[in-house]
Amino acid sequence: EAFRKYSWLNCVHVHVGSGGMGEQVLVAGVKKAVEFALEVNKFLGRDQVNVFDMGGGMPVNYGSDAWHTEKVPSFHKYAAALRRDVPALFPGSVGCPFKRVVTEFGQSLNAKSGWLASRIEYTKPLPNDEGQKITIHFGADTCMRQCYTKEHTRRLEFFDGKTMRPKQASAECPVGTLHVAGPLCFEGDHLTRDARAPRLSRGDIVVLREAGANTLSLFSRHCSRQVPAVYGYRLNLGLPSEVIEWQLIKPSEDLEAASRHWGWEPDAKRPRSEVQ
């Protein structure tokens, strides 16, 4: 009835969520929504619904470097399943009323394209010398989902701050329990409380993998944190791969820019050095 009342209403949109659903569930959801669009058009006697937004929902493999696993299908596999079970989705096919089909693959496209890195600022031993707690420069400000829930874990890797190689266990650096805390001033700012890692030192590096989605886009202003810089890089095609070019994509935010977020405007007559 809404489609008949409003002739400008021409789209069906599926809000799937941010990932984690299997291929069969995704295909079944798209099929149901397409069937609804076809039913509306049949009821109206015209192809009024001619735009279909199928959302995203594709899962990401957060457990290893592999893009696809048994539970994480490729886009090619997903598309093949849709062509098999929902042929009316594809413009140009028999029975398809859609002039445009929109997808919203965000996390599944971008998660593996980025990572976060920080040097360790502080270390603190745990009781009974069971391990240590470290404080780094990103946490719940940049990784809200990882800190606030247990459903969005990511891989953490630890590197020697001098050699830039993976931290190795030794007599001086035995493996123990590791708590990784972020920079915000509350107890919930922890990326993990149960990692196992060699003993780390101030200046060593912590890397969070699969950080190309739902990190900077969810950045929190808690404690007036400044947004970090973003860099892009190119690798050669040989083995082992090597970075051959770095490029600044977005500079880090300064105090002036962070203050503008709260409505403060600097006095144009004052020297910049005094403003900072």
Image: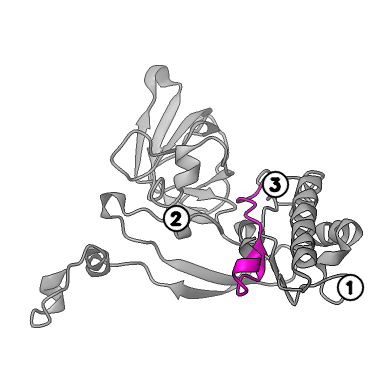
Q: Which residues are magenta?
A: 3-19
Query: Residue visible at 59% across and 70% down?
Result: 6
In the image, residue 236 lies in the stretch drawn in magenta: no
- Residue named by callout 3: 64
Sequence-first disc among 3 and 1: 3
Q: Is residue 197 above or below residue 167?
A: above
Residue 89 location (% of width, % of height): 81, 65
Does the CB distance between marks 3 and 1 fall below 8 Å?
Answer: no
Does the CB distance between marks 2 and 1 fall below 8 Å?
Answer: no
Q: Secondary structure at mark 1?
A: loop
Q: How many marks are shown on the rendered structure? A: 3
Mark 2–mark 1 Cα distance, whole angstroms, equals 39 Å
Query: Residue visible at 79% across and 71% down?
Result: 45
Side (left or right) of 8 relative to 68: left
Q: Is residue 30 above or below residue 50?
A: above
Rendered image: mark on residue 93: 1
